[in-house]
Image: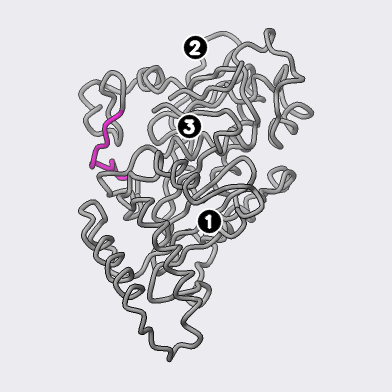
Amino acid sequence: MALRTSPFYATTDLSRAFYSLKVKKSDRKYQRFIYRGSAFEFAVVMMGLRPSPAMLMRALRPIASLAMYILTFLFGDPGPQGSAIDPAFVRPGPITRHFATYGDFSSYNTALSWLRLFLDDATLTAKTETARSTGIEVFRGVARYFGFLCEEDKESDDTSAGVAKHLGVLIHHGSLISPVRVAPLSSLPETSFSELGEDTLLSLDHAPTLSLEHFTHMDALSFCGLDNLSDLSVTPRMVDSWLRQFFDPMGLWLELMLRGRLLHRKLSSVVTSPDSTVHDVALLTELVGLYRALSSVPRVPRYLSGPFFITVDASREIIAVVVCDKLGTRLFARAQVIPSARLSWTI
């Protein structure tokens, strides 16, 4: 996976991380994502990682896209060579600014480079043991804030003199994650991570889920957040274009999502009370058509027997989507940096 900005370039080389953690060739068939030369293939075998039901979706692509968004947001635009980058052109994030003051990084150009994603793990590299320990704690805070549980350190490789590298931190997708913790991503506080203690992290891990009464429609799809795009000169077509690239893995096609949002607005204009009756034939036809379209999509998991909820959060530079089931369990999350920020993803 590569993240490009102009004139900067940084890469997360999953193939190297795959081999650096010494996964036996005979065991690679049990990995969640199997490297096929230029891409990773999804594998059903979970290796006892206690995944949520969402992780059993065959069509789910790597969580790397969301994780890389988080890193980009927190650390800022990455740079390839610290000595070759003019800091004036690098946009640091809150964690990078923290590291620049308290960490062991020579510049915030290198802040992103020490964390590489490995399958379901995070591989951390640092110049010193202290820097690595700091990185682990910060990463645990970031991961748990966004709903991931970090297990104990899996492997440490200190063979290189003075360099601590390839420390695997196993990440589990939580089974009961409150939607509050993933929206809005754009309002992430800049100073909270230095204040997160173990008790706070544990309380976040066991955050209560929202009840159905917190959603606008308990018996239908709930689409939230797009109203905030009106002052950003963002059109539904632009939203569809951005999200279509990254949200198809779950089979919830974005054209259906946008149709649902528009239909929700139409219904809101004609339904004034729970007892209201809709007589508009065209509106009813559209409603039935949307229902049939959603129910006939072959890749939508059949275990989703109840309603599910799509929350869209957007700012001037990112747009994120979170899907939750009727119990508030987060089934899927995807974030994309808006193209105006000149960022592109390659997986």
Q: Earlier in the sequence, mark 3 or mark 2?
A: 3
The kind of residue tagged 1 is: Asp
Span highlighted in magenta in the image: 40-48
Task: Give the x, y percent position of residue 227.
Answer: 58, 60
Residue at (51% x, 85% y) in the render? 272
Task: Give 227 or 154, whichever is nearer the viewer.
Answer: 227
Element marked by disc 2: loop
Up the image or down, 219 lies above or below 176; here it is below
The kind of residue tagged 2 is: Thr
User: Marks 1/3: CA distance?
Assistant: 19 Å
Give the residue at mark 2. 159
Single out the mark in the foreground, 3 or 2: 3
The kind of residue tagged 3 is: Ala
Element marked by disc 1: helix
Q: Do the residues labelled 3 and 2 touch (CB within 8 Å)?
A: no
Q: In this view, does 220 lie to the left or right of 105?
A: left
Local packing at callout 1 (Cα closer than 10 Å; few below 14, some 14-19, many 20+) is: many
Local packing at callout 3 (Cα closer than 10 Å; few below 14, some 14-19, many 20+) is: many
Image disc number at residue 140: none
Up the image or down, 180 lies above or below 71; here it is below
Element marked by disc 3: strand
Question: Looking at the rendering, in which quadrant would you find the C terminus?
Answer: top left
Q: Are marks 1 and 2 in contact (CB under 8 Å)?
A: no
User: Marks 3/2: CA distance?
Assistant: 19 Å
Task: Give 133 or 281, whichever is nearer the viewer.
Answer: 281
User: Marks 1/2: CA distance?
Assistant: 34 Å
